[in-house]
Structures are given as C-alpha cells and as structure tokens.
Image: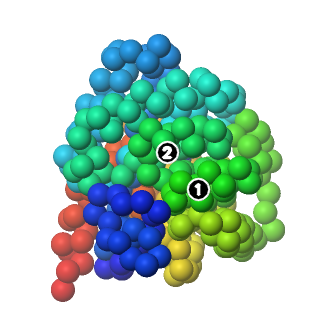
C-alpha cells in the first residue's frame, strides 16, 4: 500500500520531527469520521445530550481505529442557509475542548475543523484542532494566513458556487480537467502562502451532477498520482440514491462504503464518512485480501 504524509508545524499524535516540520505518515487509506454537532444542545455550551452523544461517538470511532475526526458546525448540504461565526463557534468550541480534555487525542486521534470561516478555524485550532477542512478551497486569504500561522495543514476542496445554489446548474466543459486543475492551482497557492501541507478533495456533490460525480470518482487515481494526498467524501450523498434508489440519507451507509472502498483502491489517502468505524473494518479486510 502507498505511503501518505501530512506535515504540521506542531507535533501531533504519531508524528515525527523532520527539518520541514512534524511529519505524520501512514500507509493505505485513513478514515476521517464525521462528528456532527447537534446545534441546539451546544448553544449554551453545557454538557447536554448533544455533547455527550458526540463524545460517545468519538470514543467509539477512536476505539474502532478511526484516525481523524471532522468537526463541523455548519451544514454545507445543497440549499443550506449560511450560519454566522458566533453560532458556528458556539457549536464546535465545547466539543473540541471536551475532546482535548477527554484524553482521546493522546490515543492518536487527529482533529479536523470543517469550516469556511477563518475566524472559526483560528479559534478551533487554538482550542485543539490540528487541521482545517475548508470546502471553499481556502478562497479567503485570511484562511491561508490562519493555517500558515498555526502551522496547520488544510484540506483544499473544489466546490462550484456555494452550498445554497451550487446544485442548480452545475456545468463543466471537462469536469476532471477543471476540478483537478483548480485543486493543483489552489494547492500551489496555499503552500506558497505558508500552509505546511495540503490534502486535495474533488468535492463530491458540491456543484456536480450525478455524471460529474461518477466521472470524478473514476478519476481519483489520476488525482492521487500527484504529490498531494487525496481526501474523498461521498458519505450518504444523493448520488447513492440516484444509483441505488435509497431516498433516506441515513440508509446510504452500504453505498457509502462501496464508494470509499473504490476510492481507497484508486489511491485515496483518506476517506470521510459518517459510518467511519464500519469503513475501518472494510479497509482492514480489503488490505488483508490484497496482501500477497
Ligand atoms: N473535505 C470535505 N468536507 C466535507 N464536508 C461536508 C460534506 C457534506 O456536508 P453535509 O452535507 O453538511 O453533511 P455532513 O457534514 O453531515 O457530512 N462533505 C465534505 C466532503 O466531501 N469533503
């Protein structure tokens, strides 16, 4: 299996110091678990049902061997209305602090903050997050500065337009060329801005038709052949309904596993799912079968 690496400006569980920074390496495909914050339970920051449920979910995922947790305080599903920074912070800060206090991070768990806002990223990194997952591809120069200053790697994702309107009229002349080209350009700009390393993500479902998504998923190998690790996130997305007829998002985990196993086989370094523990299990069986 291929070796992948991310460089941090600070030590993270499992990293080794090198002249270029603290390098985290892994072989095969790592799993990033989605850690949803239920808005109403965190707004007063108390240890309500939502926070305890999120911590329980984090423990289960860590125990199962999930390597990264992605914490998001704003839904970016198609048609989602934007959320202001204060609200987003109210949701994610208590969870990040609780995770930092829980000792779970010592077990090798890496924390990712899924946000488009530099202010939220800065605060989350201060509270204990290790990397930034920005679905806008760090369009905001302030986000580049925040990641560079903190020494935090960033996931650069492609999105056509914005969540509220991106699925209205997605259009590309050559979706692979345009998306991969955008990612390579953004990666170069972000690294030039001082961000220590990047992950590239084609942004499945972010301004793409079913055909665009399938074409991009078939081209993961091409993107993974480049110099940056590739992250694929297609968990419970609508394309699974289009392909397999599963109208309820929560019922789409089997299809999600198939999509992400396919991506791992194509060389993806990391996959982002809700059913993260199950993904670890599937990858272990797959790796064993692949051993000669
Ligand atoms: N890097 C990356 N980040 C992402 N963040 C959110 C979602 C989907 O968000 P949403 O629909 O709000 O649901 P959830 O956050 O529960 O996955 N998809 C990706 C993705 O594909 N790649």
Q: Residue 107: image x %, image y %?
A: 22, 50
Where does residue 204 sit, x and y in percent of width and height? 59, 55
Quadrant position of residue 162? top right
Q: Check disc 2 and report the residue beneath it.
A: 125
Q: Residue at x 33, y 31 (%)?
A: 98
Q: Which x, y percent locates residue 196?
A: 54, 67
Which numbered marker is on residue 212? Answer: none
| Nearer the observer, 103 or 40 | 103
In the picture, the quarter occupied by the N terminus is: bottom left
**Left or right: residue 222 compared with residue 282:** right
Residue name at image x 25 percent, y 31 percent:
56
Q: Secondary structure at mark 1?
A: helix
Residue 245 spot, x, y in % from top left: 49, 43
Residue assigned mark 1: 149
Q: Residue at x 54, y 38 (%)?
A: 123
Q: Earlier in the sequence, mark 1 or mark 2?
A: 2
**Label 1 Cα neighbours within 10 Å, binned few <14 / some 14-19 / many ≥20:** some
Residue 104 shows in this picture: yes
Q: Give neighbour class at mark 2: few <14, some 14-19, many 20+ (Cα, 10 Å).
A: many
Residue extending farthest bottom? 292
Q: Is residue 86 above or below residue 266?
A: above
Residue at horizontal 25 percent and vertical 43 percent from the top:
104
Numbered disc total:
2
Q: Is residue 222 above or below residue 6?
A: below
């Amino acid at each position: 299996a291929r070796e992948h690496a991310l460089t941090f400006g600070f030590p993270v569980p499992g990293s080794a110091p090198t002249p270029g920074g603290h390098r985290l390496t892994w072989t095969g495909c790592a799993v990033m678990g989605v850690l949803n914050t239920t808005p109403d339970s965190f707004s007063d920051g108390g240890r309500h049902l939502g926070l305890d449920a999120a911590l329980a979910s984090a423990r289960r995922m860590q125990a199962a061997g999930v390597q990264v947790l992605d914490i998001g305080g704003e839904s970016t599903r198609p048609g989602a209305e934007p959320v202001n920074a204060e609200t987003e912070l109210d949701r994610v800060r208590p969870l990040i602090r609780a995770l930092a206090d829980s000792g779970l991070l010592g077990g090798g768990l890496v924390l990712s903050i899924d946000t488009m806002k530099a202010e939220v990223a800065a605060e989350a990194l201060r509270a204990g997050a290790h990397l930034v997952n920005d679905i806008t591809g760090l369009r905001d120069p302030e986000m580049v500065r925040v990641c560079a200053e903190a020494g935090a790697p960033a996931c650069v994702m492609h999105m056509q337009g914005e969540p509220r309107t991106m699925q209205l009229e997605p259009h590309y002349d050559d979706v692979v060329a345009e998306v991969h080209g955008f990612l390579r350009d953004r990666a170069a700009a972000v690294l030039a801005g001082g961000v220590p390393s990047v992950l590239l993500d084609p942004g499945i479902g972010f301004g793409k038709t079913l055909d665009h998504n399938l074409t991009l998923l078939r081209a993961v190998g091409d993107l993974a052949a480049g110099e940056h690790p590739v992250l694929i996130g297609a968990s419970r997305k609508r394309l699974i309904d289009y392909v397999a007829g599963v109208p309820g998002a929560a019922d789409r985990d089997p299809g999600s596993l198939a999509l992400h196993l396919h991506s791992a086989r194509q060389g993806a370094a990391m996959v982002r799912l809700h059913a993260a523990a199950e993904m670890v299990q599937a990858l272990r069986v797959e790796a064993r079968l692949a051993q000669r």
